[in-house]
Image: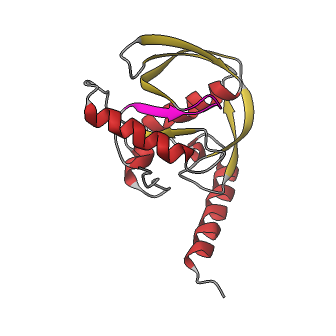
Amino acid sequence: MALRIRKLGDPVLREKSRTVEEFDAEARELISDMADTLSEKPGRAGLAAPQVGVLKRLFVYDLGYGPRCLINPEIVAAQGEQPNEEGCLSLPGIYITVPRFERVRVKCTTPSGHNVVIEAEDFPARLMQHECDHLDGVLIIDRCDDEERKRALEEYQELEMKKALPDD
């Protein structure tokens, strides 16, 4: 079942998520629902639990091979830096240039209970950093300079106002 994605202004997006201590039926259902939400529209690559109102340290992603989930992810190493444009499901329609590491090593647990280390570079590395940020209450507007932030927030407000107006 697809879930409602929380948008900028929802306080849950600014809170730090809690470690997943027990991987139970409720967590499995959450992951399934998040995967449904991610695949609901083409072009979606990642979704963190806080974006659907759940403060658990997990996210789902799909790089074209079907949805995957990382539980309690932690970036343990990073190299290089690469600025690139990013969007976010919680700020729909907004794109911001964000500097990210080119390569990361992420320690996490899989839904099957295996502790793994994932090496990622380029877009997959960017995605993992973006989703880990959500788990710490950080949004892409926090990763850019003041001028870019101001532009993005103004653009977001305009888009939201247009959505609220009735069609003529």
Asked whether, in this view, residue 23 is left or right of residue 159, the answer is: left
Residue 152: x percent and y percent? 66, 56
Q: Is residue 154 above or below residue 53?
A: below
Left or right: residue 125 versus residue 8 is right
Q: Residue furthest bottom?
A: 168
Q: Residue at x 63, y 67 (%)?
A: 159
Q: Main secondary structure of the magenta part?
A: loop
Q: Indicate the position of residue 119 as horizontal and vertical percent values.
A: 60, 13
Q: Residue at x 51, y 11 (%)?
A: 117
> Can you say whether 149 is above or below 57 in the image?
below
User: From the viewer's perspective, is residue 121 above or below residue 12?
Assistant: above
The mark tally for this picture is 0
- Give residue 167's position: percent from left, percent from top: 63, 83
> Residue 65 lies in magenta, yes or no?
yes
Q: Is residue 131 left or right of residue 92?
A: left
| Membership of 42 in magenta stretch | no
Q: Identify the image quadrant of residue 91.
A: bottom right
Q: Nearer the viewer, residue 35 or 16?
A: 35
Q: Which residues are magenta?
A: 57-66
Which residue is rendered at x = 63% and y = 18% of the image?
120
- Can I make out residue 137 in this image? no
x then y, percent, for residue 25: 26, 33
Nearer to us in this view, 143 or 131: 131
Q: Quadrant of residue 135?
A: top left
Residue located at (50% from left, 31% from top): 132
What kind of colouring is applied to the model shown? secondary structure
State left or right for residue 163 relative to residue 27: right
Look at the image and tell me whether residue 116 can be seen. yes
Considering the image in quadrants, where does the C terminus appear?
bottom right
Q: Nearer the viewer, residue 116 or 13?
A: 116
